[in-house]
Amino acid sequence: MTELKTQLWNDMGIIPPIDESEPTSINRSPYQMNIVQFVSTFAFSQPRRNILRGFLNFRKALADVGLIDGFQWVDGSFTENVEMNLKRPPNDVDVVTFFNLQLGDTDEIVMARNQLIFDQSFVKQTFFVDSYFESLQESGAYLVSKTVYWYSMWAHKRDLSWKGFVQIPLSPQLDAFALTILDTAEAEEANHESF
């Protein structure tokens, strides 16, 4: 398990793709976080908390249709210090959900439970999540191909600078706890603003 052992962002405002003090170590992107760590780390402004609430609601919608086994690669401007680099908050969070179907489920059964959560436009507008899906039950060759694709897409910014991203396991139980952390952060912010 690779965890981010340095500060979140480097001087360029991005998660470093590798351990910059030991470039050949196994400590590299994607960095493992659970959803509680992720929310605790990124819930430092109201625009980010809004996106996180959408992300948590999206994860709940996934659990509701039976997608509870797998992980998500999380990236985009949300994982960067865009407030410093671009002088604006992030607009959404980019997510690829890698999943295993539950016993007895098929793609068709899962999609029939709630087709809207597989509609990229709906998900982006409703949950602030730019969402993609990959089944972990595909062939090894396919999974290698898609892993290389997503890694090459997300390991670089549009200006081609190299960056890291985060991997979060699907976990409905921790999602509920992360939501309480988010609620607490918003309540504390509201109390602070009232003084």
Image: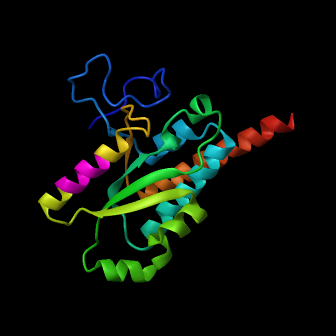
Question: In the rendered image of this protein, does residue 75 appear above or below residue 112?
Answer: above
Viewport quadrant of the N terminus = top left
Would residue 191 be counted in the magenta stretch? no
Tell me what residue is drawn at x 49 percent, y 64 percent.
Answer: 60
- Which residue sits at x=26%, y=18%? 22
What type of secondary structure mainly makes up the magenta span? helix
Taking the image as shown, residue 180 lies to the left or right of residue 149, namely right
- State the image coordinates of residue 3 (x, y, percent, origin top left): 33, 33
**Is 160 located above or below residue 174 in the figure?**
above
Residue lying furthest front: 159
**116 and 162: which is toward the camera:** 162
- The residue positioned 30% from the left and 62% from the top of the image is 134
Q: Is residue 18 left or right of residue 126?
A: left
**In this rendering, is residue 57 above or below 52?**
below
Figure quadrant of the C terminus: top right
Q: Examine the image and state in which quarter residue 104 appears.
A: bottom left
Residue at coordinates 47% horizontally, 71% vertically from top-left?
A: 119
In the image: residue 35, left or right of residue 140:
right
The magenta segment is 144-151
Q: Residue furthest right?
A: 195
Q: Position of residue 193 (x, y in %)?
A: 82, 37
Locate residue 86 relative to residue 4 in the image: left or right: right
The picture places residue 135, in percent across and down from the top left corner, at 27, 65
Coordinates of residue 50 in the picture (x, y in percent): 64, 51
Q: Taking 101 as reference, is 185 above or below it?
A: above
